[in-house]
Image (cartoon, coloured by chain):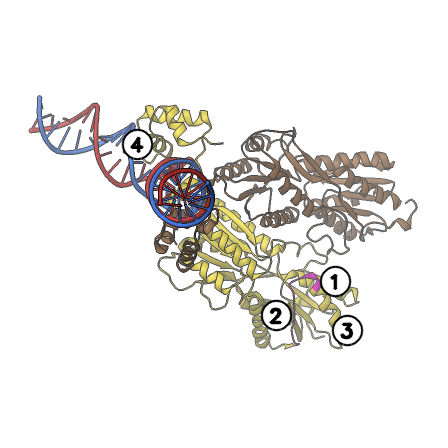
Chain colours: A brown, B yellow, C red, D blue
Amino acid sequence: MGVTIHDVARAAGVSVASASRALSGRRKVTPDVAERVARAAAELGYQPNAVAKALRDQTTGTIGMIVPGIGNPFFTTIVEAVEHQLQETGRDLLLCASQYRPDIEARRLETLLARRVDGLIISPCDIEGSVPAVLNAARRVPLVQVDRYIEGGGADWVGVDDDSALAQAVDHVAEGGARLVVFVGSRLMNSSARSRLSGFERAATRAGVATMPPFLGEFTLEWGVEVGRLLLDADTMPDAVICGNDQIAVGLVRALRTGGVRVPEEVSVVGFDDVGHAAMCDPPLTTVRQPVEEMAAEAVRLLGLVRVSDPRPAQRVAIAPRLVVRETSRPVAAGGGK
Amino acid sequence: MGVTIHDVARAAGVSVASASRALSGRRKVTPDVAERVARAAAELGYQPNAVAKALRDQTTGTIGMIVPGIGNPFFTTIVEAVEHQLQETGRDLLLCASQYRPDIEARRLETLLARRVDGLIISPCDIEGSVPAVLNAARRVPLVQVDRYIEGGGADWVGVDDDSALAQAVDHVAEGGARLVVFVGSRLMNSSARSRLSGFERAATRAGVATMPPFLGEFTLEWGVEVGRLLLDADTMPDAVICGNDQIAVGLVRALRTGGVRVPEEVSVVGFDDVGHAAMCDPPLTTVRQPVEEMAAEAVRLLGLVRVSDPRPAQRVAIAPRLVVRETSRPVAAGGGK
DNA sequence: CAGAAATTGGTAATCGATTACCACACTCCC
DNA sequence: GGGAGTGTGGTAATCGATTACCAATTTCTG
């Protein structure tokens, strides 16, 4: 390590300025100089020091990203999509996990800011607890929220249109004949949990289906299993269950089937996300597909528009998702009530 | 943005040297100076510029990581574990995906080196194609391979003990009564594919079970489905199938069941990895669990030991995995031949 | 061919934090 | 009171790439 542009310049017998110009091509140099510099750089194996360049240019070519957890396949998919988008423009991704804790999230934001990332993409873990750190960061660097967002709407956001998503899900099971529908999601600590629940309630009202009180726990398989057991023990079984994500749905289907309830014949189950293994479950899950690639592309695009120096109203981009009908929901053709 | 230590020094009425010393505490300053500097820093919201510090210190506190694809839950799990380990020591992770292509991998390596990462953790996508770029990188910065490795053994490696893994898998199905066993993996383009196949062959010989020619395709669900169909069409059905990863196993189970073959009653299926959703499949998959956290911890530990300046023989750390028996393999109690 | 214009090379400043080195002030002791 | 010793603050160099500015050379024009 340690070949600098000075070494190249000396080897080529020119000044550092000429070497820099020859390598970057930002100003003309004589063919002779250009060639000597190119040869010297190749021979020495010169590689520009991106740290020095970043200091001088006041831009690092690096984007910071913070998600609650890399273990969750939904966030993984977004990370992959964002990484892919950044590649296109030659930028790199500094990835952090907040482990669903606002205090860790705040610390990670600080170190990313200290590293002078050119922008931040974040899915804030807590709708309330994440507010101060996120707003503070947004004041210093372009910041776009993805999927989850903080209350108050102080920063740009890209996500899925939960109203449209839940409407599609509810309408679908209603068309399959469901009269009593229940929502299973997570406790209302993040925006997705809240907006999916309210989207569900609006959709149910509009579709004219009856609802049971929602089950709110965690976005996990285990919670799905637990709710399945609760439903088996209760005296009324809904015609359809709409879940806040796929993991809940998979656990729920498993528990219901184990308990002797047939899916979809007796109960339809609809998931949310369609990432990871929704399609590969048995039976394949009917679910709402998140437009992850579009979200990532939009987030990266928005990042480029933000100018910290002159604030503009926060943008909110909600992308309409698509319901993917597989085998855990009753087909429309089956029709009829319970 | 842009509060520098000069601003702090000016506000506190001291020189930059004193300000730096007061903030870092590396040399004594009078209490008076210490307090004035602390107050000034707090009031101005001073945050040290990590880029400048990196340039001066010749160390960035950043580790680069390259995996073939973030979509694969196995790599995701490793990334998460590595990120977690690095947190402990206050370092950050620059994450890249090679998309299973050596040319992209080589480019990503170059940009990570240009960014002067303090170390590299990589799972090389191609046992041959990745060789030059990986060896070149290893000459310039501490580098540890995880899971996959390049031929020739020029760089440290941490992974799972495939021999032990396959022995456990083969012995398990043999004890369940299997006499004819087949291996389904991927084409031999990466080290995992190769060493799992050879581990399988050794284990089968030692256990005295007969084998069919292996099926080598991709590490995907689709390949598992395809092999399942091939087996259904063939005239001999093995007693057990050992798979190179969980995705293949899930696809295979699905295809066999769809074709009317009962798992595990007629055929035992064993997966590999136990990440993502192996446990949540239906039926839950018998599989070999990769010791991912240990691998990540070991990789980070090794990184700290490497000194590029004085090369030492490449270390190879193979961690013994554990077979997790679930419901796709015949229990030992069942005993007996086919 | 003189002088203007255009082109290209070099020197040194810049980005921000750290620290080697020097200088000053104060204490202590004989 | 003066010399040694200790502690503290300041100045300027350093890390490496880029570029503003100046100087020198070449080219062009009347």
Disc 3 packing (10 Å; few <14; some 14–19; many ≥20): few
In which chain is the residue bearing label 3? Answer: B
> Would you say the residues marked 3 and 1 are in contact, meaning their CB atoms lie under 8 Å apart?
no
Badge 2 or badge 4: first in the primary sequence: 4
In which chain is the residue bearing label 2? Answer: B
Badge 3 or badge 2: first in the primary sequence: 2
Disc number lying in front (1 or 2): 1
Q: Which residue is mark 3?
A: B233
Task: Name the amino acid type tagged 4.
Answer: Lys
Residues marked 2 and 4, same chain: yes
Q: Which residue is mark 1?
A: B254
Q: Which residue is mark 2?
A: B170
Magenta part of the chain: B212-222
In which chain is the residue bearing label 4? Answer: B
Task: Name the amino acid type tagged 1.
Answer: Arg
Instruction: Tell me if I can see residue B330 in this picture.
Output: no
Task: Name the amino acid type tagged 2.
Answer: Val
Badge 3 or badge 1: first in the primary sequence: 3
Residue B238 in magenta stretch? no
Query: Could you say which quadrant of the image residue B176 lies in?
Result: bottom right
On the image, the x and y values in percent for residue A38 come to 43, 56
Number of labelled discs? 4
Q: CA distance from mark 3 to mark 1?
A: 15 Å
Badge 1 or badge 2: first in the primary sequence: 2
Q: Which residue is mark 4?
A: B28
